[in-house]
Image: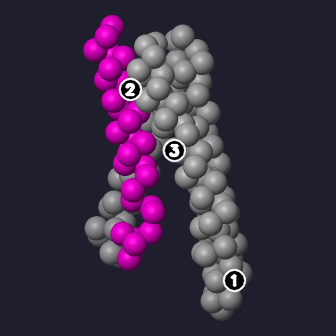
Amino acid sequence: MTDFSDFLFLTSAGLALLGVIAHELLGSPKVLGPLKDAGLPDEVVWLHHFSWHVGSVAVLAMVALFLLAVWRPDGLAFAAVATAMSAGFAALGISLALFGNRALWRTPAPYPWTLIAALGGLGLAFETLRA
């Protein structure tokens, strides 16, 4: 792979890692703590906890895939999967904000994944055009 696509994939990995750190350290106390005090059934609260942390695990997998794309000479497929994951997260965040509740626009949910998908897509395009 070229140095430029490697740079884009490393940048994508770094942004995704920052996203998961912010998700766990900043977002978790803002969302999961108040959720416990909301008077909802335990099943709802703990399913949300589970889903919250599954999101973090998925983003860590995305980070690993972008890194594998850089570290392995045949790693373009890893970048494609990571980029598709980010594009899916972006589509989900934007769709929920548009068709679910506009309050989601006031959260980070729709934004970082769009940028990461765009950077990953640029890296894939640059690498594909070079071939």
Position of 6 with respect to 99 (left or right) is right
Magenta-tinted stretch:
103-131
Kindly tell me whether residue 119 is visible in this rendering. yes
Between 42 and 109, the residue placed more toward the observer is 109
Q: Secondary structure at mark 3?
A: helix
Q: Which mark is residue 72?
A: none
Q: Which callout, 2 or 1, points at the residue further toward the start of the chain?
A: 1
Question: Of tags 2 and 1, which is closer to the observer?
Answer: 2
Mark 2: amino acid: Gly
- The label on residue 123 is 2
Disc 1 marks which residue? 36
Q: Using residue 50 as the reference point, say whether residue 72 is left or right of it.
A: left
Q: Earlier in the sequence, mark 2 or mark 3?
A: 3
Report, in whole angstroms, how far the alpha carbon at label 2 lies from the one at label 1. Answer: 42 Å
11 vs 85, nearest the viewer: 11
In the rendered image, residue 92 lying in the magenta stretch gets the answer no
Q: CA distance from mark 1 to mark 3?
A: 30 Å
What number is the disc on residue 15?
3
Residue 54 in picture, x, y percent from top left: 63, 55
Q: Position of residue 66 (x, y in %)?
A: 54, 30
